[in-house]
């Protein structure tokens, strides 16, 4: 896999962006057609969101294509500059981030495997905000070094899940922004929450830190507006108050609704290639 990533990066940097997308799309359509396991998983995950079978299949195909564009964008991080933001990215709701940061408690940027979350972290960094991201390390150390290297190129500090607790507390005390994906728990946790009327294992990290540090959760999404343009969206913040929430789990279930809203709005950009719903 490491050599495929290196080849992909080389081609993405050599070829113009439009041609890179064209090549990536061909590969993605082939993957959709021939990888039965991945296709079935995507269809399964989208089925509670999309009832119409024709639209469901079209959307699932779109997931593969958009994910291929996501990879091209990630491979091209060394070409990413502030001018890219000015030309291709529309920022919506930035006041939610700036006003929350002004309170000095640190920010938890809650996102999902949606749109281009890697490029979203890079975009926040390019806007001048101190950006960190909690990431599950890859098993292959070379692949892990490759991904972390790409993130460091755009000013994003990587916090591996193995040392996340101590370092997250420190970065929040420093008033930094820490990105968490909230739509899938890859750590092996057993906590179950409802999403789209189904049960899924969701991470408790965002709520864990918010309830213990008074950090503000700002839902943040970087989605593809069309093939070449994007929107960076900051939604209404969530602040944990004991008098408003019965428990940490209640808080998680509350902010999960905003994840549902954006996944439902952009289902063809939700990259979930493993079955995520738990059968009761």
Image: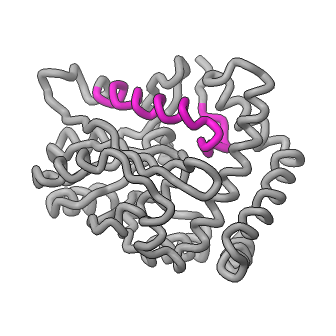
* Residue 132 in which image quadrant: bottom left
* Residue 134 in which image quadrant: bottom left
Where residue 264 sits in the image (x, y, percent)? 55, 29
Task: Answer with left or right where residue 264 lies relative to residue 82.
Answer: right
Say which of 173 and 227 sits in front: 227
Identify the residue at horizontal 78%, vertical 57% (top origin): 25
Is 272 part of what is drawn in magenta?
yes
Say which of 20 and 216 sits in front: 20
Where residue 34 sits in the image (x, y, percent)? 89, 48
User: Compared to 60, does 72 lie above or below?
Assistant: below
* Residue 259 in which image quadrant: top left
Identify the residue at horizontal 82%, vertical 46% (top origin): 32
User: Compared to 112, does 245 lie above or below?
Assistant: above
Here the colouring is: one colour
Say which of 200 and 6 sits in front: 6
What kind of secondary structure does the magenta stretch mostly adopt? helix
Identify the residue at horizontal 47%, vertical 50% (top origin): 231
Where residue 197 sits in the image (x, y, percent)? 53, 17
Q: Quadrant of the C terminus?
A: top right
Where residue 108 sits in the image (x, y, percent)? 29, 49
For the question of whether residue 205 can be seen, the reply is: no
Magenta stretch: give its range: 251-276
Q: Quadrant of the N terminus?
A: bottom right
Task: Answer with left or right where residue 187 lies relative to residue 95.
Answer: right
Is 258 part of what is drawn in magenta?
yes
């Amino acid at each position: 896999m490491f050599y495929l990533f290196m080849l992909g990066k080389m081609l993405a940097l050599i070829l113009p962006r439009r041609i890179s997308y064209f090549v990536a799309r061909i590969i993605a359509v082939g993957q959709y057609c021939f990888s039965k396991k991945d296709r079935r998983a995507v269809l399964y995950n989208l089925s509670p969101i999309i009832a119409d079978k024709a639209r469901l299949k079209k959307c699932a195909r779109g997931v593969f294509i958009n994910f291929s564009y996501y990879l091209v964008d990630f491979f091209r991080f060394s070409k990413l500059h502030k001018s890219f933001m000015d030309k291709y990215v529309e920022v919506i709701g930035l006041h939610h981030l700036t006003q929350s940061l002004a309170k000095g408690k640190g920010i938890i940027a809650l996102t999902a495997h949606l749109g281009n979350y890697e490029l979203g972290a890079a975009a926040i960094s390019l806007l001048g905000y101190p950006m960190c991201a909690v990431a599950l390390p890859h098993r292959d150390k070379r692949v892990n070094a490759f991904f972390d290297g790409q993130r460091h190129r755009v000013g994003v500090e990587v916090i591996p899940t193995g040392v996340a607790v101590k370092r997250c507390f420190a970065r929040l005390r420093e008033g930094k922004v820490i990105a968490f994906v909230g739509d899938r728990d890859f750590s092996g946790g057993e906590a179950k929450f409802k999403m789209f009327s189904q049960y899924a294992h969701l991470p408790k990290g965002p709520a864990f830190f918010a309830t213990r540090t008074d950090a503000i959760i700002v839902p943040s999404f970087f989605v593809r507006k069309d093939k070449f343009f994007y929107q960076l969206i900051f939604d209404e913040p969530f602040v944990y108050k004991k008098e408003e929430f019965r428990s940490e789990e209640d808080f998680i279930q509350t902010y999960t609704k905003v994840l549902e809203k954006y996944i439902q709005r952009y289902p063809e950009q939700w990259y979930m290639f493993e079955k995520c719903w738990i059968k009761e």
